[in-house]
Amino acid sequence: MNFKKIGVCLTLASLSMSLAFAQTAPKIKVGLMLPYSGTYASLGNAIENGFQLYVKEQGGKIAGREVEYVKVDDESEPSKATDNINKLIKRDNVDLVVGSVHSGVAMAMAKVAKDTGTLLIVPNAGADAITGPMCAKNIYRTSFTNWQPGYAMGELAAKRGVKKVITVTWKYAAGDESVKGFKEGLEKNGGTVMKELSVPFPNVEFQSLLTEIAAAKPDAVYAFFAGAGAVKFVKDYAAAGLNKSIPLYGPGFLTDGTLEAQGTAAAGMLTTLHYADGLNSKRDNAFRLAYVKAYKMQPDVYAVQGYDAAQLLAIGLNASKGDLSKKGEFEEAILKAKIDSPRGEFTISKSHNPIQDIYLREVVGKENKYKSVASKALADPARGCSL
Ligand code: BEZ
C-alpha cells in the first residue's frame, strides 16, 4: 500500500470513529436549579430560555452530546438549597448544575459543588464569595458579582456631584454587597452614604422607608431590588412623589425585565449593568431576533446570562472533547476565550467571574437605553480567592 492509500484509510477510519462517537456519545444531563415561583420566577424562566436557545442553535447538542434537562424550582429559598442540589447530583445523576438567581441559594449550591467536585455554572447570583473565598476550579459564573454594578454606580453618582445618599435593599447577601460596592465607588470619589435602610427578603412593605427618605432629603437614593420586588419599589417610590425631587439610582436589576409592569414610574431612571437595550451590535441584534422568535418576548439581562452559561459550557466541553472529567482542558479553554456575548465580548477571570463593560442606561419608554460605558472591562477584586 502506498502512502496516499494509507492516508485515505486513516482519514476514513477517523471519520468513522468520530461518527461512532457522535452516535454513541451519552447525553449530557444538565440540572437547572432556578426559581420558577416567587418574586424571582421571571428571572429563572428567562435564564432557562436563554440557555435552551443557545443549545437549540447548536442543533440540540454540545460537543456532539445531546443535552437533556432536569429542572428544580428552588423557590429562592436558601434553607432548601442543599437538599435540592444534592437530589440533582445524587438522585438524578446530573453531569453539571446551572443555578441559581438568589445569592443565598447559590452559596449553598457552591458549597456542595465544591465538596462533590460537580461542575456548577452560576447564571445570575452575584454573591461575592462564590468567586471570592469560596472560589473553586469547578465553579464558574456568567453574570456578575454584586460588587460590580454597585461599584460602577457609586463612582458615577459621585462624579455627577451626588454627595449624600440613602441606600435601600433587601437584607441578604446580594443587597448588602451591592450597597457595599456602591459605597466603595461613591466614597472613593468624595460622596457619603448617610443611612442604610433595609427590609427582609422578599418583603415589599416599603411605606415606612419611603417616609424616612422623604424626611432625610438625601441627594439621591441607591436601591437594590429585582423581579417583582423591583416593580413594587419603583412604583411606590413614584407614587410617594419622591422621583420628582430625589433621583433613584440602582444596579440595572431595578429596571431590567420589569419595565412593562413599572410603566411611567421608571421614566428617566439611570442604572448601571453589563447589558442594555440599543447596544445595536450585530451579535446582540441577532440574539434579540432569535429570542423574540422563540419566546414571543424581548430578552433581558437574565436571558443573556443563561445564553452565555450555555456558551461557556460549550467552550469548555468542546475543548475537553465532550469529557467533563478533563477539568484542566475545560478550564484552560475558558480562561483563554473571548466570550462572544450579546452584552459584548467578555473574558473570564482567574477566579472564574466575567471581566466586562458596565453600561450606564436610562429608562426611555419600555427600554433601558444604552447611554455610555460607565466602567470599561471591570474586574471584581476577587478578595479571598486563591485560585
Ligand atoms: C442575587 O441574589 O444575587 C440577585 C438576585 C437578583 C438579581 C441580582 C442579584
Image (cartoon, rainbow, N blue to C red):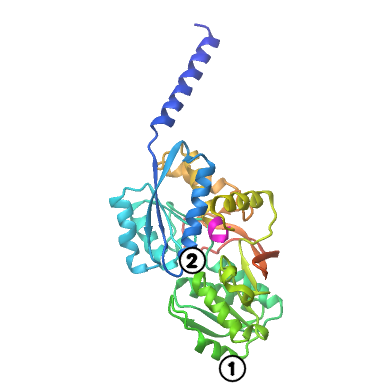
- The x and y percentages for residue 22 are 44, 31
Which residue is at the far left?
91
- The x and y percentages for residue 345 are 63, 52
State left or right for residue 98 relative to residue 189: left
- The x and y percentages for residue 85 are 34, 57
Label 2 packing within 10 angstroms: few (<14), some (14-19), many (20+): many
Q: Are marks 1 and 2 in contact (CB under 8 Å)?
A: no
- Compare residues 305 and 355 and report the one nearer the observer: 305
Q: Amino acid at mark 1?
A: Ala
Q: Quadrant of residue 255?
A: bottom right
Q: Is mark 1 within 8 Å of ligand 1?
A: no
What secondary structure prevails in the magenta region? helix
Query: What is the distance, in whole Å, between disc 1 and disc 2 at their CAs?
Result: 33 Å
Q: Residue at x 51, y 58 (%)?
A: 46
- Compare residues 1 and 223 and report the one nearer the observer: 223
Residue 219 seen: yes
**Element marked by disc 2:** helix
Q: Residue at x 37, y 37 (%)?
A: 26
Residue 332 seen: no
Q: Is residue 232 rendered magenta in the image?
A: no
- Compare residues 365 and 6 and report the one nearer the observer: 365
Q: Amino acid at mark 2?
A: Asp
Q: Residue at x 43, y 58 (%)?
A: 99
Q: Which mark is residue 44?
A: none
The mark that comes first in sequence, 1 or 2, is 2
**Element marked by disc 1:** helix
| Residue at image mark 2 | 128
Which residue is at the far top?
1
Residues drawn in magenta: 299-304
State left or right for residue 327 relative to residue 156: left
Q: Which mark is residue 215?
A: 1
Q: Is residue 303 rendered magenta in the image?
A: yes
